[in-house]
Amino acid sequence: MAKIIVVTSGKGGVGKTTSSAAIGTGLAQRGHSTIIIDFDVGLRNLDLIMGCERRVVYDFVNVINEEATLNQAMIKDKRTDNLYILPASQTRDKDALTEESVAKVLEELKERFEYIICDSPAGIEKGAQMALLFADEAIVVTNPEVSSVRDSDRILGILQSKSLRAREGQEPVKEHLLITRYNPARVNAGEMLSVADVEDILAIPLLGVIPESQDVLKASNQGEPVILNSEAAAGQAYSDAVERLLGKAVEHRFVDEERPGFFKRLLGGRA
Amino acid sequence: MSIFNYFRTKRAPAASATTAKERLQVIVAHQRGQRNQPDYLPRMQQEILEVIRKYVPVDQEDVQVQVDDSDNCSVLELNVTLPG
Ligand SMILES: Nc1ncnc2c1ncn2[C@@H]1O[C@H](COP(=O)(O)OP(=O)(O)OP(=O)(O)O)[C@@H](O)[C@H]1O
Ligand SMILES: [Mg+2]
């Protein structure tokens, strides 16, 4: 049975597209046929993060308007088998998507894919609501700071009232918390909310903690999802999150400050 | 205990993260209270506030209006804090 997973946040720029690309790639790497859809109509980004911007011919809105078929619009990833991308339109606005037309496209995709990842636009209005409407599961991307956590709570409220599952009184959308841009040193210095703080406030199960890392920018410069960089802590953290999404119990790494360096060990530090 | 740990425990605990968490707890509690509230509520709250102000000077936050749904009826709860 195909699963629709929305990657959402309320607040902009917290790492939704980075996470959609990484998690979609991770699922495909593990043999699950996956498509990542860019719902950010007018501001497409996913194609850049996935490094397929030059292969975009048709987009999601063309498919919605029946100006192109799904097969024409879907882009097969060059690096990872089982993975496709459906880019957003650069020129239309968010009103191009209607409930019926999106439902129709998703039905067709459900026949072909195991996982359909919806990269939501920022905000809590129409565009974000369309991206989460048909979701079975939601990955709520949160940065450890006040405005991001508040917006995550608002988007959780919307998931619980405006998703199709909520509207039709079905089993609720399964919620996952993904904390990104986490900096353990700053947490220890008391300057940043900790994982426990954010979990406490949002009270949904933790899918993963992605550290703040230069490797994410490097990956986006190169158009390669960071999960393909298995040396990078951020890449490893995304891999762990994918394992958990698939139901495996994996311990959380990168939550504590890096292991003490030479001097600290010399001085007998054990923290 | 190493000298580093010594300094760490000495570090002032006036952490901004603690303030952030406390603020968030209040914000989120408020937000959750407003979920599933009828759309007319903010306007009604405003009008009630205006009526009360004809008689007593109160602040916006002194008037709380909320609808609680139970199984077979809804209760409109109005909480007004009058100046002491
Ligand atoms: N773990 C991380 N460490 C460092 N930088 C990160 C991390 N995650 C995301 N970023 C950076 O944050 C910026 C925003 O990321 P991204 O585009 O994924 O966010 P978004 O939520 O999709 O934004 P929008 O709301 O505009 O769609 C990018 O510059 C990205 O490189
Ligand atoms: Mg994005």
Image (cartoon, coloured by chain):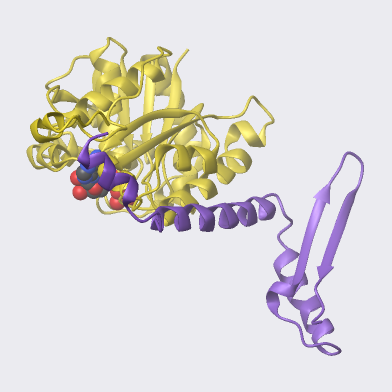
**Chain letter, yellow in picture:** A
Nearest the eye: A254 or A217:
A254
Q: Residue furthest top?
A: A31
The C terminus of chain A sits in image quarter: top left
Image spot of residue A38 (x, y percent): 31, 39
Image spot of residue A242 (x, y percent): 33, 20
Image spot of residue B73 (x, y percent): 91, 46
Q: Residue at x 74, y 74 (%)?
A: B62
Q: Residue at x 12, y 22 (%)?
A: A78
Q: Residue furthest right?
A: B72
Q: Is residue A62 above or below residue A28?
A: below
Image spot of residue A154 (x, y percent): 54, 50
Q: Can residue A62 be seen at all in this image of the molecule?
A: no
Nearest the eye: A62 or A205:
A205
Q: Can residue A201 be seen at all in this image of the molecule?
A: yes
- Corner quadrant of residue B45: bottom right
**Chain letter, purple in picture:** B
